[in-house]
Amino acid sequence: MSVVPLSYVDIGLAAVLLFMNAALSLALRLGLARRLLVAGARMVVQLTLIGLVLKALFEFASPTFTALAALIMVLFAGREAMARQERRFTGFWTYGIGTGSMMAAGIIVTVFGLTTQISPDPWYDPRYAIPVLGMILGNTMNGVSLGLDRLVSGAVVQRAAIEAQLMLGATATQAMRGVTRESMRAGLIPTINGMAAAGLVSLPGMMTGQILAGVEPVEAVKYQILIMFLIGGGTGLGLLAAVLLGARRLTDSRHRLRLDRLGAKADS
């Protein structure tokens, strides 16, 4: 079965739906029309550019260019995760914690999947490495941003309770345990929901794309299950690292809560 080609007219017709949403936003005074249109335009530009970049990467299949593309993806993921924080750490910490956690988790899980299950030749083949890393990074980014946001907001809201435990002799780790647990739960919920709904409520994107491209449904399901497991592993590792590093940043060696290391609350 061959892929059904899409024309620019087909894409333009689909874009009408976005303009309808923008019109509804104007009519209902939601204040989202401009953001919708900007996000849509940004998506078109970004995907068009990445299509050209991937075409070149696939032709060269160079480990250096593949690693460079992966690094750029991680850096942009860190920027997006930081932008979603309502209240951030001062200085480089919000960007550094999120980016470092996602880089470690994404690279570890992607290399694991490529070398042990997917096994392309060579294992760093960008046709496989970049899409797999992208799916893992996208979901890990959501988990890390949610986890850090819940960690910071929880520490602020529960400040009195945390400081009371510290005054009674609890260590910083013990006093922050409740907040860190809630942060981990918040960050993992989207992944859990995605796994629980897969197949019954929704057909995940990778599986749908393979089926539309003519792959047998059973084979597409195998790949989707593998990717979901990799996503779950990457999200868990990245979230754990980010939350633990964030909790450590919110305390010091003298077991004090350091909310002065947080910046002002971002405008909504």
Image (cartoon, helix red, strand yellow):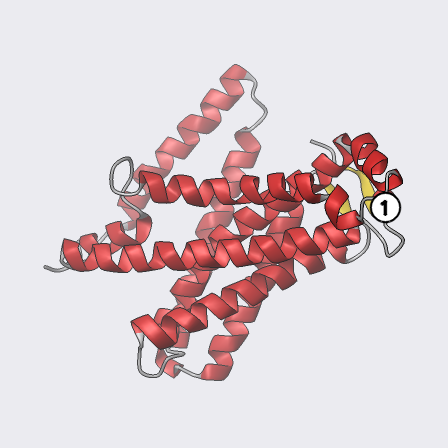
Q: Residue furthest front?
A: 169
Q: Residue furthest top?
A: 28
- Split into 4 quadrants, where in the image is the N terminus? bottom left
The residue at which mark 1 appears reads as: 258
Q: In front: 148, or 26?
A: 148
Q: Is residue 41 visible?
A: yes
- Reply above or below: 40 against 245: above
Give, as a three-letter code, the residue at label 1.
Answer: Arg
From the viewer's perspective, is 195 left or right of 74?
left
Q: Residue furthest left?
A: 1
Q: Residue at x 54, y 75 (%)?
A: 68
From the viewer's perspective, is 188 left or right of 179?
left
Q: Position of residue 75 (x, y in %)?
A: 61, 63
Q: Position of residue 161 (x, y in %)?
A: 79, 32
Q: Residue at x 56, y 70 (%)?
A: 71
From the viewer's perspective, is 169 left or right of 101?
right
Q: Position of residue 84 (x, y in %)?
A: 63, 43
Q: In front: 224, or 82?
A: 224
- Reply above or below: 88 against 104: above
Q: Position of residue 65 (x, y in %)?
A: 49, 79
Q: Toward which corner of the image does residue 267 lie, by quadrant?
A: top right
From the viewer's perspective, is 190 left or right of 123?
right
- Split into 4 quadrants, where in the image is the C terminus? top right
Disc 1 packing (10 Å; few <14; some 14–19; many ≥20): some
